[in-house]
Image (tube, grey):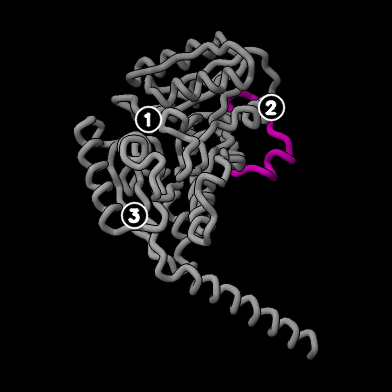
Amino acid sequence: MKTAWKSLILALIAGAVLTSQAQELKGKKVYHIASYHAEFVWTNTLVKALNGVLEPTGAEVRTVYMDTYRQKSPEHLAQVSAECKAAIEQWKPDVVIVSDDAAMKGLYAPFFKDSDVPFVFCGVNWDASIYGVPSKNITGMLEVCPITDLLAEMNKLKPGKTIGYLGSDTLTSRKDAENCAKILGVNMESVFAKDFATWKQGFLDLQTKADLVVIGLNLGISDWDEAAGRQFVEENTQVITGAFYDFVENLALISYNKLAAEQGEWSGNTAVKIMQGTPAGSIPVAANQKGELVINARIAKKVGVTPSFEMLQNARVIE
């Protein structure tokens, strides 16, 4: 009976703490500006994680989508950035969260750097200094590729010395390849494809030039065919292939995926700290640390490798 009462008292205390936290931030406002559209998988996952942190606090959260992935023109970025600027000035949020590079480029850097409006960024690839970070009114989480973790897992399957990289011919993909090579301290044979035919030929070429092949972004390949891509790699993979984006996990034998949810949760928790009184610029810029291990059993069978029991226990398996 005493144990039951003790559990009830602890539950009531915990509930009171949560209630007080919610009341503490009631009336506060958070404006989230997402660079892409709501249906973009990375953005959708990030928003859910962000709202999962902020909604229980009682703060009001508004999200707007800039749609710069589908509408890539400078004119569109300038227009939506101006609209977001006007909304911030009118609504006067306590914190502005911006996800991915376009919002930093179009909104924060030209209009709000060193202003009195606290900002939190997330999903910015590798380096935010081009946007004026560090600054007194901003902190954030960089998006970096977990290449050392991925290579460690790839080498468990079959050690290799030479590394290849295959990705779309985009700025993000080139930044990924450059920074991965820098972190590893190696020269990587890299192929950047504008179209599906070039991507397939690059895949075949790298099978003979590298022991390990990293599959990077396919976003930006003009005529990408997902079903054909999956079939192609299952028929033509000869070496250990790896990835760190979940939307290409079906193209690689093993993946160590970055998590959009980590970016959203960190941003939400950081926004809470700012609303509680911590200056944004005093919070150190972070980088993602978590990852999800994925094994593609179909490709593993094709290559003739058998992941260890321990690896399979810690992984999500694509059958």
Q: Position of residue 170 (x, y in %)?
A: 37, 23
Q: Which residues are magenta?
A: 301-319
Magenta stretch: includes residue 221: no
Q: Residues within 10 Å of mark 1 (few under 14, many from 20)?
A: some
Of badges 2 and 3, nearer the viewer stands 3
Q: Position of residue 237 (x, y in %)?
A: 53, 21
Of badges 1 and 2, nearer the viewer stands 1
The residue carrying mark 2 is 157
Tell me whether the residue at label 2 lies in contact with that at label 3, contact meaning CB atoms closer than 8 angstroms. no
Tell me whether the residue at label 1 lies in contact with that at label 2, contact meaning CB atoms closer than 8 angstroms. no
Q: Which mark is residue 219?
A: 1
Query: Is residue 319 in view?
Result: no
Q: Which mark is residue 89?
A: none
Instruction: Identify the residue shown where x is 47% and y is 35%.
Output: 133
Instruction: Identify the residue shown where x is 62% and y is 15%.
Output: 211
> Outermost residue toward the bottom?
1
The residue carrying mark 3 is 63
